[in-house]
C-alpha cells in the first residue's frame, strides 16, 4: 500500500474502537487486516455512519493511505505501518448479532458447523482450505506433467467392493432398483487401462457408509491413479512425485525419494502395525524360541512370545495401568521384568525364568521389558498399540521428523472374523505375487499380494496394487472369496468380459486427500480441512441433512419407509 495513494478497500469489520472523536475500524479480508481511521473532521458523513457499524458488517471505504506515527505502528500486522484515512464510507451489508466471535477460542464444534460460513471466515479455516487448494493444484500439475490424464467416472453405478457399506440411490425410472455411489472408481479405472488410456488420474470423490471418526467422512476425495504396462516401482515412483510436489508447493522440504520400502511381514514383526510410526524406535523383539522350554507355562505354551524394552523403570502403579490398557486391547495380562536404576530385577515372573532367559532379556538399568504372549496376530496388535502409547507417553516421538514408508507384500486374503471365511485384504482385483497363484486354493492365508500402502508418520495415506489382468486368475480369486461363478458373473461380469479382450498388465493407487492435507496442515481432525463436513452421527448441522422426503416423492420411487423404532 503506497503512502499518499488513494485506495478503495472492501471487507469485513474485524473490530471497531471508539476513541472519542476518532473511530478505528480494522477491516479484514483473506489477505489480512487494514486499519481505517474515521475522523469526523475529515469526513462527517463517514463519522455519522460509523456508529451503526458492528463486527462482521461488510464495508467499502475510500481514502488516503498514510503512514502511522511511530508510536502507533503495529508490528504484528503486515499492514501495521500504514492506515487508511477515510473520506467515503459505505455499508455494503449488515450482520445480525453473531453466535460466536471470530476470535473466540474453543467454540463448540456444533455451533461452528451450524454457522460454518462464519467459521470459514476465521484465519485457521482460511489457511486450511487455501492450503488444500494449493496441494490439489500442485498434485494435478505434477500428474499432468507426468503424462496422466484426468478422466471422469460415474457416481451413479454398481456397488464397488472396497469393504464398506454402499450408499444407494433409488431410481424413479425403474422403481425397486438402485444405483450405488462408488466406494472408489476402481473397476472403471481398470477398464480405462483395457481401453488404452494408459495413464489415468482423477481427484475422485468416494462414498463409504462407515462410522465417522476424526479421520473419516462419508465422502472424501482421493488422488486416484492407474497405469498400464507398469510395475510396482513405476506406480510408487509416481506417487512419490505427487507427494513431493505438494511439499514443494507449500515451500517445505520434500521427503527424499525413493521412500523406504518394508514388507508387511517385517513391519508387523518389528512394529506390530501395518502403518508404523517410524519417528521412534522401540521395536518389538522376539522371545518365542528363547522361552520354548521355560518354566513359566504361559510363555512355554504360547505360539508367540514377544517383548518391548521401554526406557523407563516403571512403578507398580504405572505397570498396573499399562496392564489395564493391554487388557482393553485384548491381552490377558502384561508380564514384565523391571531392571531398576541399580540393576535390580523387579518382576513377579522372574522366579520362573532361568538364568539364561533372564540374561538374554537383560536390559539397561532403568528399563522395563514388557511381554505379549499368545497368537502372533494378537500379540503383534497389543505390542504395536503399547509401542505407540509408550512412544507418546515417554516422549520418544521426534516430531521434527517426517517418515514416509511403503509397506509392500501384503497378504492376499485375511480371515473374516464374522463369517470365518476368507476375505480380501485390499480388494478382490489385487494381483498375486508371482509364484503364489497356486496358494489361492491350497493355502489362501499364505498367499502374498502385490498390494502396497503408503504410510506417513504412522498414518495410512492410501493403498494400491498391481492388479489381476488375467480372467482365469480373477475367477479363482472370486471363488476363494466365496463367490460362485454365477455371483461373480452377476456382480462383475463386465470386468470379467473385459479381462478377456486384451487387458494389459496394470496397477494403481489411491491416496486419501483429506488425510494428506490434514497432516500437511497439522490438523488432527479432517473436519478442520473439509469445508462442510458431517458430524459423528452422520448429520450435517448446517443444512440439516439427511432429511425425510415428501410422501409423493417416495411414491414415485416405489418406496415405503418402515416405521422407525423411537
Ligand atoms: N480403489 C482402491 C482404494 O480406494 C485403491 C486402489 O487400489 O487403487 O483404496
Image (cartoon, rainbow, N blue to C red):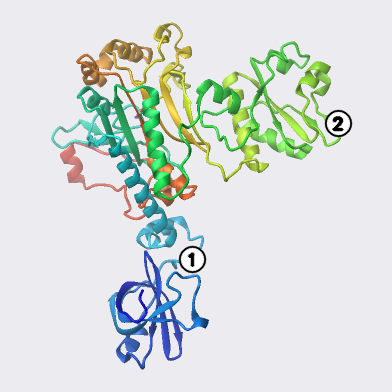
Residue receiving disc 1:
104
Could you say which quadrant of the image residue 229 lies in?
top left
Q: Quadrant of ligand 1?
A: top left
Residue 11 position (above or below residue 169): below
Residue that lies at the very extreme toward the bottom in this rendered image: 41
Could you say which quadrant of the image residue 556 lies in?
top left
Q: Which mark is residue 10?
A: none
Q: Residue at x 21, y 20 (%)?
A: 494
- 208 or 431, which is in the foreground? 431
Give how far apart the Cα atoms at labels 1 and 2 are: 53 Å
Residue receiving disc 2:
344
Tell me the quadrant of the picture where the C terminus can be found: top left
Q: Residue at x 78, y 31 (%)?
A: 364
In the displayed structure image, the side of residue 214 where residue 393 appears, left or right: right
Could you say which quadrant of the image residue 424 lies in?
top left
Query: From this viewpoint, is residue 537 visible?
Result: no
Q: Nearer the viewer, mark 1 or mark 2?
A: 2
Task: Give SS at disc 1.
Answer: loop
Q: Residues within 10 Å of mark 1 (few under 14, many from 20)?
A: few
In the displayed structure image, the side of residue 4 where residue 301 appears, left or right: right
Q: Residue at x 28, y 47 (%)?
A: 548
- 502 or 526, which is in the foreground? 502
Please count the marks in the image: 2
Is ligand 1 less than 8 Å from the beta carbon at label 1?
no
Q: Where residue 35 sits: x, y (%)?
A: 41, 77
Tell me the quadrant of the picture where the N terminus can be found: bottom left
Q: Where residue 79 sits: x, y (%)?
A: 42, 72
Is ligand 1 less than 8 Å from the beta carbon at label 2?
no
Tell which circle, 1 or 2, labels the residue nearer the N-terminal end.
1
Amino acid at each position: 500500500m503506497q503512502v499518499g495513494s488513494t485506495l478503495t478497500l472492501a471487507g469485513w469489520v474485524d473490530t471497531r474502537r471508539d476513541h472519542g472523536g476518532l473511530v478505528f475500524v480494522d477491516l479484514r479480508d483473506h489477505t489480512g487486516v487494514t486499519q481505517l481511521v474515521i475522523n469526523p473532521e475529515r469526513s462527517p458523513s463517514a463519522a455519522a455512519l460509523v456508529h451503526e457499524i458492528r463486527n462482521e458488517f461488510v464495508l467499502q471505504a475510500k481514502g488516503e493511505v498514510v503512514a502511522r506515527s511511530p508510536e502507533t505502528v503495529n508490528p504484528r500486522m503486515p499492514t501495521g505501518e500504514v492506515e487508511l484515512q477515510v473520506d467515503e464510507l459505505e455499508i455494503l451489508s449488515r450482520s445480525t448479532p453473531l453466535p460466536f466471535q471470530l476470535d473466540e477460542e474453543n467454540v463448540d464444534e456444533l455451533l461452528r458447523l451450524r454457522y460454518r460460513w462464519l467459521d470459514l471466515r476465521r484465519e485457521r479455516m482460511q489457511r486450511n482450505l487455501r492450503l488444500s487448494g494449493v496441494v490439489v493444484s500442485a498434485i494435478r500439475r505434477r500428474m499432468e506433467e507426468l503424462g496422466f490424464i484426468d478422466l471422469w467416472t460415474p457416481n451413479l453405478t454398481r456397488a464397488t467392493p472396497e469393504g464398506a457399506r454402499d450408499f444407494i440411490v433409488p431410481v424413479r425410472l425403474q422403481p425397486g432398483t438402485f444405483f450405488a455411489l462408488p466406494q472408489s472408481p476402481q473397476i472403471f479405472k481398470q477398464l480405462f487401462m483395457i481401453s488404452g488410456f494408459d495413464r489415468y488420474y482423477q481427484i475422485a470423490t468416494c462414498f463409504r457408509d462407515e462410522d465417522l471418526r476424526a479421520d473419516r467422512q462419508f465422502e472424501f476425495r482421493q488422488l486416484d491413479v492407474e497405469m498400464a504396462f507398469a510395475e510396482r516401482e513405476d506406480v510408487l515412483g509416481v506417487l512419490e512425485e505427487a507427494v513431493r510436489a505438494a511439499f514443494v508447493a507449500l515451500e517445505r522440504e520434500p521427503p527424499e525419494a525413493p521412500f523406504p520400502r518394508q514388507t508387511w511381514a517385517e513391519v508387523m514383526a518389528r512394529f506390530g502395525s501395518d502403518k508404523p510410526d517410524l519417528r521412534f524406535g522401540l521395536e518389538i523383539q522376539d522371545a518365542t524360541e528363547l522361552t520354548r522350554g521355560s518354566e513359566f507355562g504361559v510363555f512355554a505354551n504360547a505360539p508367540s512370545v514377544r517383548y518391548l524394552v521401554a526406557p523407563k523403570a516403571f512403578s507398580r502403579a504405572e505397570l498396573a495401568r499399562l496392564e489395564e490398557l493391554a487388557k482393553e486391547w485384548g491381552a490377558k495380562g502384561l508380564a514384565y521384568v523391571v531392571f531398576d536404576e541399580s540393576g535390580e530385577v523387579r518382576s513377579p515372573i522372574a522366579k520362573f525364568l532361568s538364568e539364561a532367559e533372564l540374561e538374554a532379556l537383560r536390559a539397561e538399568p532403568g528399563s522395563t521389558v514388557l511381554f505379549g504372549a499368545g497368537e502372533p496376530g494378537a500379540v503383534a496388535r497389543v505390542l504395536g498399540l503399547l509401542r505407540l502409547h509408550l512412544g507418546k507417553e515417554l516422549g520418544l516421538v521426534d516430531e521434527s521428523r517426517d517418515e514416509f514408508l511403503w509397506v509392500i507384500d501384503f497378504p492376499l486374503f485375511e480371515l473374516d472374523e464374522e463369517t470365518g471365511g476368507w476375505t480380501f485384504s485390499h480388494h478382490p482385483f489385487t494381483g498375486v505375487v508371482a509364484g503364489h497363484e497356486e496358494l489361492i486354493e491350497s493355502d489362501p492365508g499364505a498367499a502374498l499380494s502385490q498390494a502396497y500402502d503408503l504410510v506417513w508418520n504412522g498414518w495410512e495415506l492410501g493403498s494400491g496394487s498391481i492388479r489381476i489382468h488375467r480372467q482365469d486368475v480373477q475367477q479363482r480369486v472370486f471363488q476363494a472369496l466365496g463367490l460362485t461363478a454365477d455371483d461373480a458373473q452377476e456382480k462383475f461380469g463386465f470386468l470379467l468380459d473385459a479381462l478377456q479382450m486384451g487387458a494389459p498388465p496394470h496397477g494403481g493407487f489411491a491416496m486419501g486427500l483429506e488425510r494428506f492435507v490434514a497432516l500437511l496442515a497439522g490438523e488432527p481432525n479432517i473436519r478442520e480441512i473439509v469445508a462442510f463436513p458431517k458430524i459423528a452421527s452422520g448429520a450435517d448441522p448446517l443444512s440439516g441433512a439427511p432429511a425425510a422426503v415428501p410422501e409423493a416423492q417416495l411414491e414415485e420411487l416405489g418406496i415405503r419407509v418402515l416405521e422407525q423404532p423411537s
